[in-house]
Image: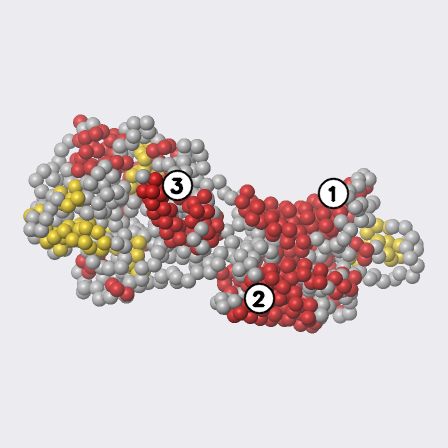
Amino acid sequence: MAIAFAGGVHPPESKDSTQGLASQDVKAPETLVVPLQQHLGAPANPVVKQGDKVSMGTLVGEPAGYISAAVHSPVSGEVLGVEMRPLPVGRRGLCVVIKNDGQERWAEGCNAESDPANLDAKAIRERVRAAGVVGMGGATFPTDVKLAPPENKAIEILIVNGAECEPYLTADHRLMLEDALAIVLGADLARRAAGARELIFAVEENKPDAFEVIRQASAGLKDAGTQILPTRYPQGAEKQLIKVLTGREVPSGGLPMDVAVLVQNVATCAAVYYAVKFNRPLIERIVTVTGPCAAAPGNFRVRVGTPYADLLKVVGFSKPPRRIVMGGPMMGIAQSSLDIPVTKGTSGLVLMDDIPADEWLPCIRCGKCVRACPVSIAPNELGVLLEFGQIDQASTLDLLDCIECGCCTYVCPSRRPIVNWVKAGKAELAARRARQGKAAK
Amino acid sequence: MTQESPQIDASRLSVGVSPHIREGEDVSRIMWTVLLTLVPIGVGALFLFGWYAGVIIIACVVSCVFFEALWQKLAKKPVTVTDGSAIITGLLLAYVLPPNVPVFVAVVSSAFSIIIAKQIFGGLGYNVWNPALSGRAFAQIAYPAIITPSAWPIVQGSGFQRLFQDIRHIAPVGAGPEGYDAISLATPLNVDALKTFAPDAGGNAHLMYPSLKPLFIGNIPGCIGETSALLIILGGLYLIYRGYINWKVPAVYLGTLFVFAFFLPTWKIAGARTFGGLPDYPAALDAPGRLFFPLYQILAGGVMLGAFFMATDMVTTPVTSRGQVIFALGCGVITGAIRLLGHGFPEGCCYSILLMNTATPLVDRYTRPVKYGAVKK
């Protein structure tokens, strides 16, 4: 039986309005904005220019280095330009703007079925890399890199993460119900690529139907099990999931591979399946659009590069949202424009009405954050130090162990934006180290 | 189902940081709930000690709020008296002052509580010592004659009060002074006052303690809000139910003192000697007496109020449950040591909590949870 991770919170799940609705296809819009950076690592280098004809799956950006990912055209049409456009992460970045010709024509060699039975690990990883697959749970780390652990780090267990612990989001839930076989077969391919022996499919207990579907779909697989997890945020966070399923703790500052475990999101596994079996690049994903201001909330199969405005036309507003969050409400990012496009990491758009006030009070040391912290650090002390700019002291106090899940800030009766301070503190620390590195050279 | 194009002005979208939802608990709700649980104790004090107790309560609350606002105005800081914390300090300070204290003592002690103990350190959240207890300790040092227990009024008079008046004979202690026919308890914890004798039919004097019933209900001499264990426990249970205080704190604090008091007479009987010697105890205690003495210790004096409302103060006590248990244990031991091993003070609750407040950062440091991943690579 799964053991519990420390801390955590249980916010209202708010999934009822979308979890029962089948995902709908959203017609690709007339103009798409495809960011060259939809992943962690270096932005892809553009390989197209204004006026180039592209098809679905045409490479438009090639990986710039090992930790980077390929980017493909989600539609057939013509490149209008390669321009700086606003990105979901709150800054601008280079994007390939494509005019859709509506032909829905695949590029040559794409969307062609082949039998992956004889592929070795390296060949699977090459196809994953060529298809530009990245972690679709939100972290967007290039999947092929994750599937290629260094030689001294053998992987034993691949965990397939179907926890979807963020409130509001149901995209993974729908995918598990609607495309379980792709998840299961993709997970099996990923296991082969990583050289792992065991597969664990993990689903939170608020999705019993998805659990059952995955259990049946994976029944024929060797060394594969299905685990039900308590509904508790952040159950789906990599380190918490590993602890709960294997009892192992990723060492501070380490990676899951240090305990011979790898975690892949369910949607990533499905993307691996389509990449390897059908040579289909990652150009589409399921996005939950929901929230108190959504007129017709639901799950939508959306082309990467679709501006929010086009997607929101389909959903409509019941009232004007005061905030639009990309991702879930616990860790998602507030969006400043409707011109920002859906990317490979866009699990949802939450149209919020009530938003937290910006004012905060001093810490009254109630200890709620300490009890809620899933990595068992002292958010109260970090918060006080960072509020007054004591970054050095904060860094000796586990600043870098914070997973930024937001539990401390969620429960804080003084409404202290602890996570925000932590993010700023980490950024400042990184900048300082970069400066020191330069000075040393 | 295509609908009309969304008519929103994207430039007005709020772009605050995650998380975008909050649990809904806030500081003023915590403060006002604590206040609510303190009100019955104050109302009870009016019944037990009369209208003048109300004057002291009002004097403390009004002065605490006044001094907080005054300080914040002078320091050009936002005035935050509506958060309720100064009102709580005022109420708690009044509750640990004697019911016959002059108003000026209440006012000066309030000023000490708010300005010296709280605002000097940075205000709400940054104070090291419990402000109300700091004010009480100040009063005890600055006005010892007024705060001395023997100066406190004796509970007597109204029919309501007589309803609960009850005296318990504990142990015969030999012949007492002639002519005693009444009890003059100063405070249950003033050891000298406990040496009160009453003759029985055979002419033997008896050491007198109040029985547990008035101790529980509060019809005994003492500070304004400390005497009614009943009302304190009711308020405390509600705070535990709401999750604002850790039940382990009063349990461990009172439990430690209980154990301390339970075993101490045994040492005394066995001829054990501690520093400074021991005050007199009802030595030859029979079985019910053995339970009576520790129960008497946790019901009398300020320890009940301290255990539920002071040792649980969020700001000045450790943040983890483990740390809070250590804190409570320390309070119990220090209270026991001051009360039962010492000669100077009859009451140890106030100083035990202030001393443990001092130790709180240290306790916090050594009870920090083991972080995830604190293992060898």
Q: Amino acid at mark 3?
A: Gln
Q: Which residue is mark 2?
A: B87
Residue drawn 62% across and 61% down? B132
Task: Tell me: A101 left or right of A329.
Answer: left
Q: Residues within 10 Å of mark 1 (few under 14, many from 20)?
A: few
Task: Tell me: B202 left or right of A91.
Answer: right
Q: Amino acid at mark 2?
A: Ile
Circle 3/circle 2 CB separation < 8 Å? no
Residue drawn 86% across and 56% down? B197
Residue A217 is situated, as x and y percent measured from the top left of the image, at 26, 37
Residue B153 is situated, as x and y percent measured from the top left of the image, at 77, 66
Q: Is residue B172 above or below residue A249?
A: below
Mark 1 → mark 3, Cα distance in angstroms: 47 Å
Give SS at disc 3. Answer: helix
Q: Amino acid at mark 1?
A: Phe
Q: Which residue is mark 3?
A: A240
The quarter in which the C terminus of chain B is drawn is top left
Q: Residues within 10 Å of mark 2 (few under 14, many from 20)?
A: many
Residue A341 is situated, as x and y percent measured from the top left of the image, at 21, 54
Q: Which residue is mark 1?
A: B263
Q: Chain of mark 1?
A: B
Mark 3 → mark 2, Cα distance in angstroms: 42 Å
Q: Nearer the viewer, residue A103 or A36?
A: A36
Foreground: disc 3 or disc 2: 2
Q: Nearer the viewer, residue A421 or A162?
A: A421
Residue B324 is situated, as x and y percent measured from the top left of the image, at 57, 48
Q: Earlier in the sequence, mark 1 or mark 2?
A: 2
Residue drawn 46% across and 58% down? A414
Give SS at disc 2. Answer: helix
Mark 1 → mark 2, Cα distance in angstroms: 40 Å
